Image (cartoon, helix red, strand yellow):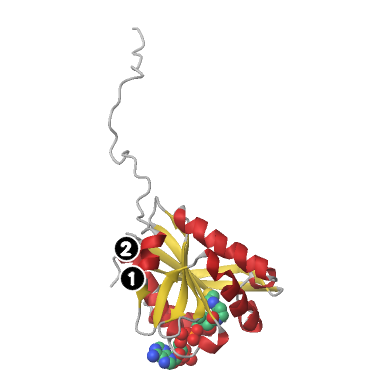
């Protein structure tokens, strides 16, 4: 019996085989800059090229407070490094890789820190929440307020499905922020980061758009 050859032009639709690229929606940076995310005490403004100098001052002024938990701090060792980071933020937003905000005091417009959604995966509509504050901006609930607004932005404006957040198991300030935001504990990633010559175990948390 002759073998039945398959017509190469034949297309049998397979369940679930529809292309599903770019499921995330990334609001244009210019639009969010014109109408920043507002919280009670802060504005979340997309990081811009012009933020390099302020970022440098913020990191330089809080170096000891930040370097215990954030592996990039020692590499942020000159104003040019902050300028390059600002450039990367612009490019990452515009190409849909990450969405990072300057947290600004609503009254004075001073830069207080950064909150952002890194590692955006369009296919799975997922990302990672990251944040830091200048030392003098801590202890007032600013990050809880800003990170909550960032999470709301992800779910409401980017059609995000899953947001992951990780903190070192002994970073109690960050763990308290994550708890206040209603993230659920998923497990421990052992020795996930080498920070200041110390391996940090990470507690991994996530929130889904369908979570209460
Ligand atoms: C993690 C970090 C952003 C948390 O800052 P924070 O000031 O503790 O967090 P918040 O801005 O949400 O403030 C919460 C604190 O302010 C107090 N507070 C005062 N007024 C408040 C208000 N209106 N609402 C909420 N909290 C308030 C809270 O009691 C809380 O203190 P507590 O946790 O000791 O009870 C900060 O410690 C930081 O930048 N650390 C270094 C970088 C870092 O670790 N990044 C995260 C890596 S995973």
The quadrant holding residue 126 is bottom left
Q: Quadrant of the C terminus?
A: bottom left
Q: Residue at x 34, y 60 (%)?
A: 158
Q: Is residue 145 above or below residue 32?
A: below
Residue under label 2: 157
| Picture residue at 37% right of the left edge, 65% below the top | 32
Q: Is 35 rendered above or below residue 144?
A: above
User: x, y percentage for residue 164?
Assistant: 44, 66
Name the one closer to the observer, 4 or 68: 68
Mark 2 crowdedness (10 Å alpha carbons): few <14, some 14-19, many ≥20 = few
Looking at the picture, how far across and down is residue 173, in whole percent?
51, 84
Rendering coords of residue 89 (x, y %): 52, 62
Q: Secondary structure at mark 2?
A: helix
At x 59%, y 79%, the residue is 58
Name the one closer to the observer, 23 or 101.
Answer: 101
Q: Is residue 161 above or below residue 165?
A: above
Question: Nearer the N terminus, badge 2 or badge 1?
Answer: 1
Left or right, 198 with reference to 126? right
Q: Which residue is mark 1?
A: 152
Q: Residues within 10 Å of mark 1 (few under 14, many from 20)?
A: some
Question: Residue 73 falls in which quadrant of the image?
Answer: bottom right
Give left or right: position of 200 versus 203: right
Q: CA distance from mark 2 to mark 1?
A: 8 Å
Element at badge 1? helix
Q: Is mark 2 within 8 Å of ligand 1?
A: no
Question: Considering depth in this image, is 35 or 211 the residue closer to the camera?
Answer: 35
Q: Which mark is residue 63?
A: none
- Image quadrant holding the N terminus, namely top left
Find out if the beta carbon at label 1 lies less than 8 Å from the nearest ligand 1 atom.
no
Q: Quadrant of residue 35?
A: bottom left
200 horizontally vs 104: left or right: right
């Amino acid at each position: 019996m002759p073998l039945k050859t398959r017509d190469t032009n034949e297309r049998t639709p397979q369940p679930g085989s529809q292309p599903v690229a770019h499921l995330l929606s990334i609001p244009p940076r210019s639009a969010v800059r014109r109408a920043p995310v507002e919280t009670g005490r802060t504005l979340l403004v997309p990081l811009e090229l012009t933020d390099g100098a302020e970022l440098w001052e913020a990191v330089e002024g809080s170096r000891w407070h930040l370097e215990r938990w954030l592996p990039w701090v020692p590499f942020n060792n000159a104003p040019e490094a902050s300028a390059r980071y600002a450039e990367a933020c612009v490019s990452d937003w515009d190409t849909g890789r990450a969405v990072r905000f300057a947290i600004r005091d609503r009254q004075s417009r001073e830069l207080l820190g950064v909150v952002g959604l890194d590692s955006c995966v369009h296919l799975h509509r997922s990302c990672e929440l990251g944040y830091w504050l200048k030392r003098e901006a801590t202890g007032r609930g600013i990050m809880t307020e800003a990170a909550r607004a960032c999470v709301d932005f992800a779910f409401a404006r980017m059609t995000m499905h899953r947001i992951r957040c990780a903190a070192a198991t002994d970073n109690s300030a960050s763990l308290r922020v994550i708890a206040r935001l209603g993230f659920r504990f998923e497990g421990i990633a052992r020795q996930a980061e080498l920070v200041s010559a110390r391996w940090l175990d990470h507690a991994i948390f996530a929130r889904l758009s369908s979570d209460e």
